[in-house]
Amino acid sequence: MKSAASSLAFSWVVKSEDEEVRDFLLQHMELRRYQALSDLDETELTRLLEDADEQARELLATQGFFNPQLSWQKNPAQGPSPLGQVTLAVDTGPPARITQVQWQWLGELTQAPTGPRQQTSIQKQWGLPPGAPFTQAAWSQAKNNALRQLVSEHYPWGRVAESEARVDAETNGVVLRLTLDSGPAVRLGDLNITGATKYGALQVARLARLPPDQPYRQSDLLEAQQRLVLSGFYDSVFVSLEPEGNLARPPVNIELKETLRQRWLLGVGVRSDSGPRLSAEHTHHSVPGLNWRAVSRLAIDRDLQTMGLDLLAPPDSSLWRWNTSAQFNRQLRDNDVISSQRWRAGRLQTGPRIDRSYFAQYDMASQQSNALGNLESVSGNFAWTWRNFDSLPFPSRGWGLGLELGSGVSLGAVSQPYVRWLAKGLSFWPLGSNSGRLAVRASMGSVVSQDTRYLPTTQLFLTGGDNTVRGYALNSIGVDLGQGLIGAGRYLSTGSVEWQRPLRWNGQMTDWETAVFADAGAVANELHLLRTQTSYGIGARWRSPVGPVRMDLAHAQALQKWRLHLSVGFTF
């Protein structure tokens, strides 16, 4: 069998102090594909090298090198290649740099009161300012970014009318000239909805929130599309402007594919805390006679059994919805059995960035180790969540805040008033293109009451598990009741720092990331009794089609044990 080297008519190498230039030429020059020609002779090779010299200069020009020194050398055959080795020595010389950027504007932007502000914003974010090195790729990207900014607000029909990069090869200077034509300013026309058969066009219009004559903003169309998708009523949504007809007031096309009226989801999985798990979920998107969406859930594993029902009304014109729910849990924890139920009724409003809800809630819980029996409470609550992440469900930068506030009273023999609050935050800090990011998470909460013994455990705090303090079992960090039993407490504090770093393969980004983390958490009935439980570990992340999959191996310091945690999805 012949070796791979013996099948090449000639070998060739590129010598350059700049490794990126060397790799770029080796990858893009056509000379490499002629190496496999078995009938190539010296005369043809000489002609190929003349063409290769011109191509190398053209390629280097795209990288901003307009005065390179190229030296070609042919070494006689001494190995398996019959025509020997070709060597290209490259001295790129200094890179060309931008000396001036000339702007010209056309269209209604030049007459609009907001035109100067938009022009200034585009120029401030221009990617090739004077002094920057010039490359063809950077020039193309800068033009695309400028156009993207132009069409994002008021002017969706904007275009690059003219562009020119004038190069002075002697001075290695480049003068850029760009003409942007905004076209007409646009206000939204009427909605043109297709595919709304089962759930009606009125619901689509309420979720989209794109009233006629509203000034065009690309973000409004994207947020409308996202609201429709997140509503759960539609499998696919496409929102766009009609490019034909009145360009100053185009109709808004909303093309939908509605989801099935009923859907079953059956699941078999493994919880890191309690082994195999079975789950079932049934969704009815329009309950007959009520027209509300009903979601029924059942999940069973060794330690935790959960059953629940959620009823959600269609949104009104402000995207507020009525919501009722019931949930029943039974949990085995450290040879103790906790049974609980929760009934809730209220209204909620969800959006791409902000969620709000207010509701009345009834809680009941009983703990086998607690001689007080069933503990009950009623409360009024408000919850608010604000998200500012760059991309969901795979954020790489941004932050989010959440706040829950409730006030209620215990029921039964003792009526004990209380106030409960919980605050949480999550932030992602980029560390550079090759260094990944830091994810910082924290939460604090407390129950303000003279005596919490008569409150259900569901109104108090526990921590530990996949999404809080890894290395510890779910809700295993709480107040020590003695005899190996753990109870819920009135004070909570948790924190986590995680370094997430993308994995590359052959220089390309993959769907995998590594993680190194440290977690901490504490629960107590008195502030001075808070004792922080800590853990640390390593993990892997996979960008799966259903959301992020997390696999973590964590070491609990207090237990001196390792625990594997598996979870799916991003929630905040």
Image (spheres, rainbow, N blue to C red):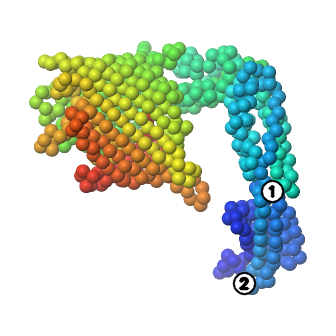
User: Can I make out residue 153 in this image?
Assistant: yes
Q: Residues within 10 Å of mark 1 (few under 14, many from 20)?
A: some
Does residue 307 sit above or below 61 in this rendering?
Answer: above
Give the total number of marks visible in the rendering: 2
Is residue 551 or residue 88 the one in the foreground?
88
Q: Residues within 10 Å of mark 2 (few under 14, many from 20)?
A: few
Mark 2: amino acid: Gly
Camera-side mark, 2 or 1: 1
Does residue 467 sit above or below 316 in this rendering?
Answer: below
- Which residue was labeled with disc 2? 79
- Quadrant of the image occupied by residue 530: top left
Label drawn at residue 178: none
* Badge 2 or badge 1: first in the primary sequence: 1
- Real-space Cα distance between discs 2 and 1? 34 Å
User: In the figure, is residue 327 to the left or right of 1?
Assistant: left
Is residue 401 or residue 152 the one in the foreground?
401
- Which residue was labeled with disc 1? 61
- Quadrant of the image occupied by residue 105: top right
x and y percentages locating residue 339 in the rendered image: 21, 31
x and y percentages locating residue 554 in the rendered image: 34, 52
Q: Quadrant of the N terminus?
A: bottom right
Is residue 3 or residue 92 the one in the foreground?
92
Mark 1: amino acid: Ala
Q: Secondary structure at mark 2?
A: loop
x and y percentages locating residue 457 in the rendered image: 23, 30
Q: Secondary structure at mark 1?
A: helix
- Write the residue at 46% across / 34% down: 400
Q: Quadrant of the C terminus?
A: top left
x and y percentages locating residue 15 in the rendered image: 73, 71
